Amino acid sequence: MKSKTSPQMAVKLGRLKLNNPVMSASGTFGYGEEYAGYVDLNRLGAVVVKGLSLKLRLGNPPPRIMETASGMLNSIGLQNIGVDAFIEEKLPFLRKYDTAVIANIYGETYDEFKKVAKKLSSAKGVHALEVNISCPNVKKGGVSFGTDPKIAARVTSTVKDETGLPVIVKLTPNVTDIAAIAQAVEKAGADIISLINTLTGMSVDLKTHRPHLKNITGGLSGPAIKPVALRMVWQVIQKVSIPVIGIGGIMTAEDALEFLILGAKAVQIGTANFVNPHATLNVIEGIKNYLIDNKIRDINDIIGTFRF
């Protein structure tokens, strides 16, 4: 019989305090309100909203989603309503909840990153910024910012100069040495690192001999990428001293626990939200049950217990 005593689930990522280590991943949870009918947002560690740009973006033309074996390809192209509309129309709803709100931001230039960061930093109800230097399906900026250590560092320092909020830098897996990128953004002032974003992939239509996606390539996510994500998270944890958030193919509590055991302080749930809108809550409850079953009173007691 399980103990009725609920384990301690709160975690700290530097100055960022979360009620538990489970948050939504940007681009898979809308602006939070879309899932509020399925998920009590108060129970999440954090809501990470869709990537926000300086101006409204329509994204890439369809088709832009394709199911694959153990995952999906997307080439949405960072469609969003723009930072001003987010602050005016979406943020008031999120302020109703006792949950950290993390704004994922995107720019095609350093100046755009600067302006978006500045606007959000003065908006009530934003607890951290996640800097997207890792989107593989936009023609400008995106992954190009995240593949060169010097450029990644410059984006990081540009955002840091404009905000007093914790800055999370989201890394791309589409690089030769992800640890080198992580070290560069840490040196530039990143408070937290999140990884991984999607892997670049494509799919071919056998009837038309054309790509399934209008953009030709897109970002691969879902269970197929979890082993790659685990490996990269482990590599980064060995090389940086700032907190790391694990992302990639997390569908269950067991998946999330693998990242936590490696040393990730928190995790983000992405593609699983499309399969099961209750995925984030299921992962939280599954982690709690694991702790109870193993008589562990505090989630922090398992973080970083990986042995090799």
Image (tube, rainbow, N blue to C red):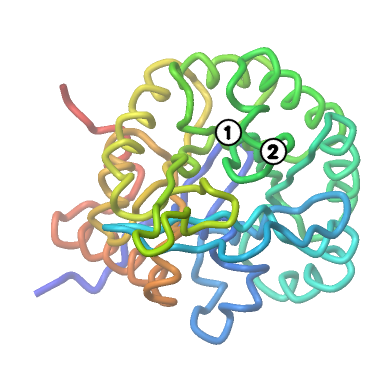
Residue 114, position in %: x, y? 87, 35
Say which residue label 2 marks. 166
Q: Is residue 164 left or right of residue 235?
A: right
The answer to whether any part of residue 29 appears in the image is yes
Q: Is residue 61 left or right of residue 116?
A: left
Residue 8, position in %: x, y? 37, 56
The residue lying at 54 percent from left, 39 percent from top is 13
Task: Indicate the amino acid at tag 2.
Answer: Pro
Pick the front one: 283 or 303 = 283
Residue 85: image quadrant is bottom right
State yes or no: discs 2 and 1 in contact (Cβ < 8 Å): yes
Of labels 2 and 1, earlier in sequence is: 2
Assign a secondary structure to mark 2.
loop
Pick the front one: 177 or 137 = 137
The answer to whether any part of residue 20 appears in the image is no
Residue 127, position in %: x, y? 71, 51
Residue 29: image quadrant is bottom right
Q: Is residue 243 left or right of residue 255?
A: right
Of all residues shown, which one is farthest toward the front?
Answer: 208
Q: CA distance from mark 2 to mark 1?
A: 8 Å
Say which residue label 1 marks. 192
> Which of the image's four quarters has the N terminus?
bottom left
The residue lying at 27 percent from left, 53 percent from top is 297
Q: Residues within 10 Å of mark 1 (few under 14, many from 20)?
A: many
